[in-house]
Image: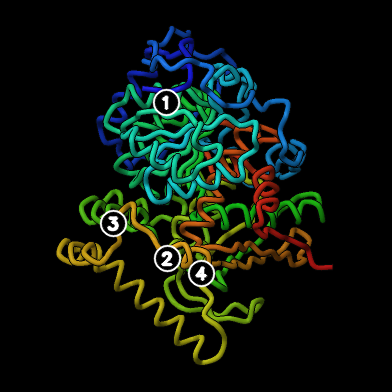
Amino acid sequence: MIENVPTDDNAPQAEADQATTEKATTSKPPVKKAPTRKAPAKKTTAKKTPAKKATTAKAPAKKTTAAKAPAKKTTAKKSPAKKSPAKKSTTKKPVKAPANSAKKSAAPQSSAHGREDRPLDIVLYGATGFTGRLVAEYLAESAPAELRIGLAGRNVEKLKSVQAGIGGRAEHWPRITANSADLESLRRMARSARVVITTVGPYAKYGKPLTAACAEAGTHYVDLAGEVTFIRESADTFDEMARRHGARIVHACGFDSIPSDLGVLALHEAARAADGTGHLGDTDLVFTRLRGSFSGGTMASGALEAERLSKDKHARKLTADPYALSPDWDNDRRSDFDRDVRGPYYDDVLGTFVGPFVMAAGNARVVRRSDSLMDWAYGPQFHYREGMGTGSGVRGRMKAAALAAGLAAGTLGMTFGPTRSLAKRFMPEPGEGPSEESRRNGYFTAKLHSTTALGTQVSGEVSAKGDPGYTATALMISESAITLALGEGLPERTGVLTPASGIGVPLIERLRGAGMTITAEVAA
């Protein structure tokens, strides 16, 4: 049910796509086969059939306070499309174009599934959860006034409570009743908006039905997923449908993996401005400062992933592969540099010992997927690793070694049922989180460095104030959705994408405008 807003009764749905959606969301897709994404054909999309009318409340349309569609009144900075790495790169492809690369969509964004005629620009699904409420607060305070925003969840009364607590413009936002167990409710929600934000996790448990609904409806989608198996299954199952309907399904739009993904994209852009290619060599990202906590949802996702890996050898093999999200990565380009950091090493450029970082495995695979989707824009010598800086000297080395031992022990322990059960007793529940003061005092800084095609050093930084898993994450996913809704300068590719390949430079510019630091420069 949608309150206070007319639904889009003319949203098309192809019967074949509905069958694919229902099959994908009721059965577990295999993860052992490599995805073979076909390049989009030039033929038109499937013949459209009218969708069933969504049930609406009798509230008069005049109660809707939403502004007009933002297509001509955006307040965002303009970022010309010609700067997109996928469009102007002079990259000489090191290998044959990958079968799973997302090519340019044949249909322009404005005409895809009638998104311009939809009653809402952004719908936030999961608004009553802890992270969802932070996202709602950010949107109420920072989203451009012309964007029409709605809140969605299972319980209307809880949605009303969230709106009353936030106040201001949020009190007038439409409310949508939707449930992950009710595919038709997700379809109605997806057809009502141009962009859907979901904070409802674990995504491996709850994410596939909504991903399917958005791909089917041609609705852009952003989430906070960090589970490699979920992202891979999403790409295997929904990429072709999403491209056919002009949808951008963008996973990992929070602390995992925007700092990593956009940090490398910024290095690429700086290198391209310097030498015309944008090619990078061995690339390091090191978190040098970090203060924050993991959300209950993140921990629940990690526990669920660990449980699955303990039972599914194919999933274990998949997640151990550094190229799990870009399986078309040529064997000749594979390098030990790309392996996940297990033990301490010394970074000569930054002058610090480095140990493993708990989120690096997912982040690194997203970065490599971006390179694949952008037709290897980072060049034939690009390799990537990520870790946690621990300082110099004997103390720095010992801290890095302790970090490695602790992470190894924790990873091993979570593969055993009794250990997982014990750990869950001490984890915050999904929907719980730290105090406002604790969130405000958090921060992170990531340093990056690489080399250009000319052999000169390129370095950068990504940093933000606020707890990385809460305050900064709410900012990052919100700005991802806003950038998609405004639609200026976006890469033309559609499908199951990453922040760098699906939103790109316009998102870097919006995040900078929102207070994040994202810099890159080539040494003179």
Depth order, front residue of 296/57? 57
Residue 136 is situated, as x and y percent measured from the top left of the image, at: 49, 43
Using the rendered view, name the quadrant where residue 13 is placed.
top left
Question: Which image quarter is the C terminus in?
Answer: bottom right
Disc 1, disc 3: CB below 8 Å? no
Disc 4 packing (10 Å; few <14; some 14–19; many ≥20): many
Q: Earlier in the sequence, mark 2 or mark 4?
A: 2
User: Is 403 above or below relative to 182?
Assistant: below
Tell me the tag on residue 429.
3
Disc 4, disc 1: CB below 8 Å? no
Name the residue type under label 1: Met
Depth order, front residue of 17/187? 187
Q: Earlier in the sequence, mark 2 or mark 3?
A: 2
Farthest left residue in view: 418
| Point 36% across, 18% down: residue | 18
Which mark is nearer the camera, 4 or 1? 1
Tell me the tag on residue 293.
2
**Cα–Cα gap, marks 2 and 3:** 13 Å
